[in-house]
Image (tube, rainbow, N blue to C red):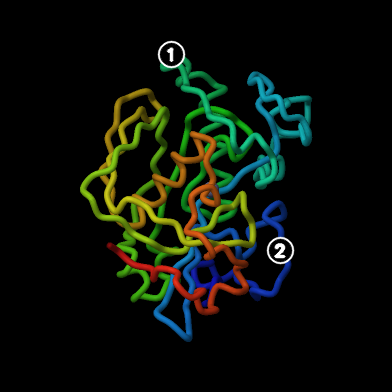
Amino acid sequence: MEAIQWLKPQHRIPLTTNSSILTKPLSLHTPFSITRCQHKPSKTAIKVDFITKNRDRNMSYSTGPARAGWFLGLGEKKNVADLPEIVQAGDPVLHEPAQDVRPDEIGSDRIQKIVDDMVKVMRRAPGVGLAAPQIGIPLKIIVLEDTEEYIGYAPKEDVKAQDRRPFDLLVIINPNLQKKGNKSALFFEGCLSVDGYRAMVERFLEVEVTGLDRYGKPIKVSASGWQARILQHECDHLAGTLYVDKMTKRTFRTVENLQLPLANGCPKPGVR
Ligand SMILES: [Zn+2]
């Protein structure tokens, strides 16, 4: 597979590059990197989000490392370089449930800045989704978007198999996800908080998400295919669940090994 296919040209780097998500928009942090299997039917890999180790000073996280910068608001310059980093798996904060945002607080500068920063971090990666806990903020906020450009770098057959279509930026506060129908989809998926790895995850094919937009107005999103996968992945983050907590057994592997055949007995990717 070629994980770089979803990357913007300037972000393309060899898969052998030992890049860290904490550095910059390098290859492995693309939204959804598609993978091609040369020995088997093509498989896909998703890169759904991004995170940081900074903590919101107003929240009560018990875990403590990496409290520097950004959200602590200790007088540092607030430029792009000060955007939050992405919290990596291994930090217990990723397994803590997020809290509802009080509706009367949505219009506040604090919440608006969190949303703005989430969008910036997502696009910087670049990525197609991000949940607030991934930048160290235990609030129920997700952002997601997919673009013609990102999709243009993916093999057409994979785009078709995943039912991947572009959609405009979505900001959903206090999302409530419900599955629709009984079909599911099994594809490789990644997470910016589990940098460098992929695994197959079974997701509902269609979902409906209700919540509030960034202005506090009720919204409802009906999604299928890849967008439905992104929504499920991000909502899982709000429940303190990573994809590795629900991945298909024996499919976990490095991005570099994505093209290798699946282990005997593993289910094949696709819609079921
Ligand atoms: Zn994730």
Disc 1: which residue: 104
Q: Residues within 10 Å of mark 1 (few under 14, many from 20)?
A: few
Q: Position of residue 222 (x, y in %)?
A: 25, 43
**Could you tell me which residue is drawn at 37 percent across and 23 percent down?**
216
| Residue nearest the viewer, comparing 221 with 237 | 237
Question: Is the CB of the residue bearing disc 1 within 8 angstroms of ligand 1?
Answer: no
Residue at (65, 76) in percent of width and height: 14
Question: Is disc 2 placed on a helix, strand or loop?
Answer: loop
Q: Check disc 2 and report the residue beneath it.
A: 19
Q: Tell me: residue 264, above or below residue 186.
A: below
The residue under label 1 is which amino acid type? Asp
Viewport quadrant of the C terminus: bottom left
Vertical order, 223 against 258 (above or below): above
Q: Residue at x 50, y 73 (%)?
A: 5
Residue 146 located left or right of residue 121: left
The type of residue carrying mark 2 is: Ser
In this rendering, position of residue 272 left or right of residue 66: left
In this view, the residue farthest toward the bottom is 39
Q: Quadrant of residue 120?
A: top right
Q: How many marks?
A: 2
Q: Position of residue 238 (x, y in %)?
A: 49, 34
User: In the image as oriented, which residue stretches furthest toward the top?
Assistant: 104
The residues bearing labels 2 and 1 have C-alpha atoms spaced at a distance of 41 Å
Name the residue at 34% across, 29% down.
211
Secondary structure type for disc 1: helix
In front here: 198 or 252? 252
Decide which of tag 2 and tag 1 comes sooner along the chain: 2
